[in-house]
Image (cartoon, helix red, strand yellow):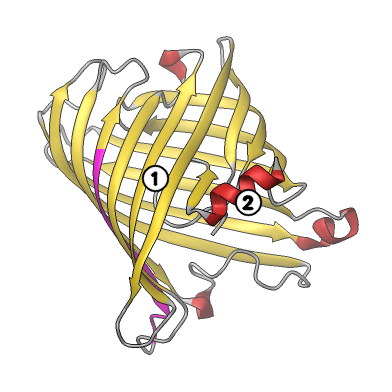
Amino acid sequence: MRVIFSRLSDKGFTLQKTVAGTDATDGAQFSFLHTFNKDTVYTANFALIYKHNLTNDGNGDHNAFWSTQFSVEGALTSDESQAEDAWIFRGGFIYDHGGTSIHQRLRGYYLSLDAKMESDQDFKTKKLTFEGQFIPTLQALNIGAPRNPDYLKPVQFRWRPYFGLDVGHTFKRGGSSETGDTILRFVPRVRPALYLNFLSIPLGFTDTYVYADDTFYFLPLEDVKRRHNFFTSGFNIDVTPNFGLGLTYKNGETAPKFTRVNTLGGVLTVRFGQQ
């Protein structure tokens, strides 16, 4: 299986958890989640991404690249009403500026411009949006720094802010709580993570970490009371770079339907092509 992963990775493919932007922090997740006051649900949360580097920035800076990126992302579940329940098809351009200093305070950034089709699992909801995302890097404050760059430190803290904008149209509303046909969303997000190297090193694991991830959807064209927040957190052990185990908790409402999720359970993670 590692040979298969390596071949796909060499050709520009990445498998990870459904996540906006370049931060491949979690593998694809296959979960056994208990919905509070209801039954256990089984979920698959994955993104298969193809990325093709076009060129550097033209100034000899090989840490900066224009790329095309296409992905099929799924949050699929055995109980439609209690999980994220989504397909997302995304394609567009990204500009990834690495760690070379481009400003006294800004060490790098990631910018993506995509066309995105959102649907629920049964395609009863269909939405087409144009998405823009900006993700800064500031190593002095551990913002967007490379994942666990100093493995010998006993504990490391990293966090990453995301700034997103979605503009589009709803073609089929289905069970979505967005009432207008015109879509306008401001989508800030933040992800802090604490890497527990004092556990990983003696146990021989690739990584051991706890994380939180909070996404806030502000929909100015909707009723002002309809502000949706989606929070996840968990404890993950990456036994190898490709496989891991974890525990995850989810609470909130997420696109495209904004149906409430409240689950806790174990996950198996699978990853290749990690950036």
As drawn, the label of residue 112 is none
Residue under the point 53% across and 44% down = 16
Number of residues whose C-alpha sits closer than 10 Å to that of mark 2, classed few (under 14), some (14–19) or many (20 or more): few
Bounds of the magenta segment = 105-116
Residue 268 relative to residue 70: left or right:
right
Q: Secondary structure at mark 2?
A: helix
Q: Amino acid at mark 2?
A: Ser
Q: Amino acid at mark 1?
A: Thr
Q: Mark 2 or 1 closer to N-term?
A: 2
Q: Position of residue 151 (x, y in %)?
A: 74, 69
Q: Quadrant of the N terminus?
A: top right
Q: Position of residue 202 (x, y in %)?
A: 90, 59
Q: Quadrant of the C terminus?
A: bottom right
As drawn, the label of residue 6 is 2
Residue 12 relative to residue 124: left or right:
right
Asked whether the viewer can see residue 19, the reply is no
